[in-house]
Amino acid sequence: MCGIAGIFHRNGEPASATRLKAMCDAIAHRGPDGEGQIVYGPVGLGHRRLAIIDLSPLGRQPMVTQDGRFSLTFNGEIYNFNELRAQLAARGCTFVSRSDTEVLLQAFATWGLDALPRLNGMFAFAIWDTEAKVLTLARDRFGVKPVYYAEAEGTFLFASEIKGILAHGAIASGLNPEALVEYFTFQNFFTDGTLFRNVRLLPHGCYLQVRPGDRNAVPVRYWDYHFEEPSQVANKDELIDQLDHLFMQAVSRQLISDVDVGCYLSGGMDSGSIAAVASKQLSNMKSFTVGFDVSSASGVEVGYDERVAAEYMSYLFKSEHYEMVLKAGDMERALPKLAWHLEEPRVGQCYPNFYAAKLSSRFVKVVMSGAGGDELFAGYPWRYYRAVTSDDFEDYVNKYYAFWQRLVPEQLLPDVLAPIWSDVKHVSAKEIFRSVFQEHASKLTRPEDYVNHSLYFEAKTFLNGLLVVEDKLSMAHSLETRVPFLDNDLADFAMRLPAGLKLGNLSEVVRINENEPGGKHERYFERTRDGKLILREMMARHIPSKIVDRVKQGFSAPDASWFKGESIDYVRRRLFNSNARIYDFLDKRTIQSLVTDHLEGRENRRLLIWSLLNFEQFCEEYL
């Protein structure tokens, strides 16, 4: 895993080696083990190296084919590189290193864009073809590794992080006000836009080609999620056997490394099962858990500390286990550095992830994560059930859109964004929501169809946001995060499974407010063990039943309690400050009224408060 950056002057102007190095220096934390830049007239490719496979100088980048035609800068890992290497060798290709980088370079030189569907891994790369004069950017199927791009007056720029693009100097660090509609509705970005004006994120499963004469390069999709009911349902026991084989294969594939590999151990079944399989192949596996001081927590947040379950699994797997305990106040300590690395706020309250990566990076360079299991195997049943009884697509959109307004409801947006509303009122959050489904052709006639539609939506949006956040926060500590659930074969199998094997009674609509504090069971009928049913059955082969049967719980700090308790002074100091930068874009009276509702215990607005604090820090760091 590394950092990449590059320049392409479409008008033929020579690329500046000095500016290219500045772009690479801005993302040096992504690759402290080495750097390299090459310039070919109007094109410059840069690289920062985090050495994982083939630690020798032969793995350095940018890498060039022996005939000099293709040059590559690459971030990520190709887990099936040995199989591809054998196929390429059979076609007469020769290799001078053991790196997956050289295999990727030879694969593209041999198969061109047809190489992309053959790659099983996480990647973002750029290849310059000196003969055809074409620059190709590509991103992996699932979007584990990001790459951003921007263009100004004929200069095309790209980098693993936005700060790499800004370091060039051609793109100003200005805010994209239209993106605030998207963010303060969804706490995420569903389009390829960002909070930075003129900077875009290449979508997952896409490539983009830039030529001297083109004015606007357009991403082209080579892969997408497709959840559908099978025409014929296989025997359930056979499906569990297949799932077990594919899961163990995925973990084994992603253990390939020339440096130490560890595992996150949250206390849940996804990370626990990965650790169980990995521990059989790693002689001295290290595991990492972040817990929380819940002494001042209340309601459901009292159960947010999962250290006991993680320690139990560490005992079973005989891992070398390390823990960190977060307290009220740790968020404010981390936020300045976190916001600089994150660049723009995205989904979730991610500072626990920042600390988890910080802890892990002290002992390993690679860590395994359970991300993707919930999205592929239906881990959030209370979400899907909200729209499972829809009449048609429009009814479905209305129901699911209402649920996914995570921060500010649509009717309140004009008040929240009052200072800029005249400039952004043309932006429709609902149409942005609807546009997510434009490439997922599916007949919506059964509850299962609506569930599959929801799984598609969450993989495209929620998971995508989580992956971007995880990349930024792990690479802030020069740590590579791998996600075995997003193995090509395992994901393809998961998308073909019947919805009824993932969930229970699909006609049962569960109404639950995820952010409500206190005892949810006393007010709602909630089946939080209803998701990932077939995955639970398979994982029972690897981890104890008391872990498999645990109630579903996310990785969150007890912030609802802390914000109105021990952290209340910090919240007031940041958000009730008349000079706060956010009030250039948000209405002070409206925001402070919403925050007061939480501080005085009338509403749970923990996600909104975190997002406001994060946005304020973003403004200070980048505007």
Image (cartoon, grey):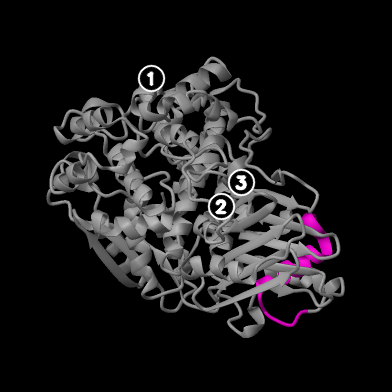
Q: Which residues are magenta?
A: 95-115
Query: Would residue 99 be counted in the magenta stretch?
Result: yes
Tell me how far mark 3 sits from mark 1, CA to CA.
29 Å
Amino acid type at circle 3 is Pro
Q: Look at the image and tell me whether residue 506 can be seen.
A: no
Q: Position of residue 247 (x, y in %)?
A: 55, 57
Point out which mark residue 411 bears.
1
The residue beneath circle 2 is 171
Tell me if residue 129 comes above or below residue 615 in the rendering.
below
User: Between disc 3 and disc 1, whose residue precedes?
Assistant: 3
Tell me how far mark 2 sits from mark 3, CA to CA.
21 Å
Query: Would residue 355 be counted in the magenta stretch?
Result: no
Estimate how packed mark 3 is, as few (under 14), some (14 to 19) or many (20 or more) residues with alpha carbons within 10 Å. many
Image label count = 3
In the picture, the quarter occupied by the N terminus is bottom right
- Residue occupying image coordinates x 23% and y 26%: 523
Magenta stretch: dominant secondary structure: helix
Amino acid type at circle 1 is Gln
Left/right placement of residue 355 relative to residue 169 reads: left
Q: Position of residue 341 (x, y in %)?
A: 42, 58
Estimate how packed mark 1 is, as few (under 14), some (14 to 19) or many (20 or more) residues with alpha carbons within 10 Å. few
Farthest residue, direction top: 391
Cβ atoms under marks 1 and 2 closer than 8 Å: no
Which corner quadrant of the image does residue 335 belong to? bottom left
